[in-house]
Amino acid sequence: MTARRLAMLLLAPLLMAQSAPQLVPDISARRVDIQYSFTGAQLLLFGAILYPGGRVPKRQADIAVVLKGPVQPILVREKQKIAGIWTNAESSRFRSAPGFYAVASSKPIADLVDERTAAIYELGLQNLQLSPGGGAQPDKERRFEAGLLELRHRQGLYAENPNGVEISGGVLYRARIFIPSQVPVGTYTAETFLIDRGKVIAAATKDIEVGKSGFERFVAQTAQRQSFLYGLAAILLPLLLGWAAAELFRRRGA
């Protein structure tokens, strides 16, 4: 093998990388603090598409942005009305349900990729990999998956916006995703996908921290580090408040 051919083989991966477009994403806030007055936050996810040589193709590619919260196990219970009373009936456990999930795209996901690609990248609510606990019949798993998706959608924790990404000049993009007040704390991942002709041709990831601050952070840390004292305070505080209220009314009555 000649030296020239060897050099071309070594440089081939670099040349291929230079011939592919790249994403440069950013987020309006890298950290979201949850305080007593927190009513939610709107994040702006934006960035640019860098094409080789700065030449923007005539055919505009599409963008899908996914914001996913910390993965956690969850037990879903199904309630049934028996003798006029609602009671817990069947249940199903999921090992890896995201605490928050929102996807925004420049077009509906079904118009961008096929079902297999959507499942691989978890694009769309119906393509979330929830990892059922196993042992249940497929129809039961599907029923509980649908129930979990519907419940978290009503809570504002799962959302899908098929026209939520704006692309300007084929290069700049932006999307707005709302985070409700009841989101879990932890590390969130913002994934951006560049899609062309049904294929993901570039991807980029950014992390966002959602945490408690101020008095809420103190309470959460105390509950975690001093669980006995926290439990004792949780019992004594209502008793003291009740006694103080009763004493106040007794004095006013006197």
Image (cartoon, helix red, strand yellow):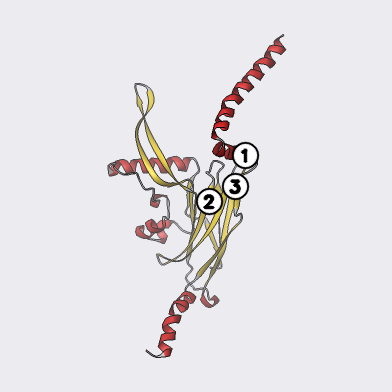
Residue positioned 54% across, 60% down in the render? 166
Please tell me which residue lies in front, 216 or 121.
Answer: 216
Work out how far the residue at label 3 is from the one at label 2, CA to CA, in angstroms. 16 Å
- Image position, residue 55 (x, y; %): 53, 76
Q: Residues within 10 Å of mark 2 (few under 14, many from 20)?
A: some
The residue singled out by tag 3 in the image is 41
| Amino acid beneath label 1 | Phe
| Amino acid beneath label 2 | Thr
Image vertical order of residue 39 relative to residue 107, above or below: above
Q: Which mark is residue 232?
A: none
- Image position, residue 238 (x, y; %): 60, 24
Q: Secondary structure at mark 2?
A: strand
Image vertical order of residue 31 relative to residue 47, above or below: above
Question: Nearer the N terminus, badge 1 or badge 2?
Answer: 2
Image vertical order of residue 154 relative to residue 111, above or below: above
| Amino acid beneath label 3 | Ala
Q: Residues within 10 Å of mark 1 (few under 14, many from 20)?
A: few
- Give the side of residue 82 with respect to residue 26, left or right: left
Q: Residues within 10 Å of mark 3 (few under 14, many from 20)?
A: some
Image vertical order of residue 244 relative to residue 45, above or below: above
The residue singled out by tag 1 in the image is 218
- Image position, residue 205 (x, y; %): 51, 60
In which quarter of the view is residue 90 placed? top left
Question: Nearer the N terminus, badge 3 or badge 1?
Answer: 3
| Residue found farthest to the left | 137
- Image position, residue 129 (x, y; %): 38, 51
The residue singled out by tag 2 in the image is 187
- Give the side of residue 152 with respect to residue 93, left or right: right
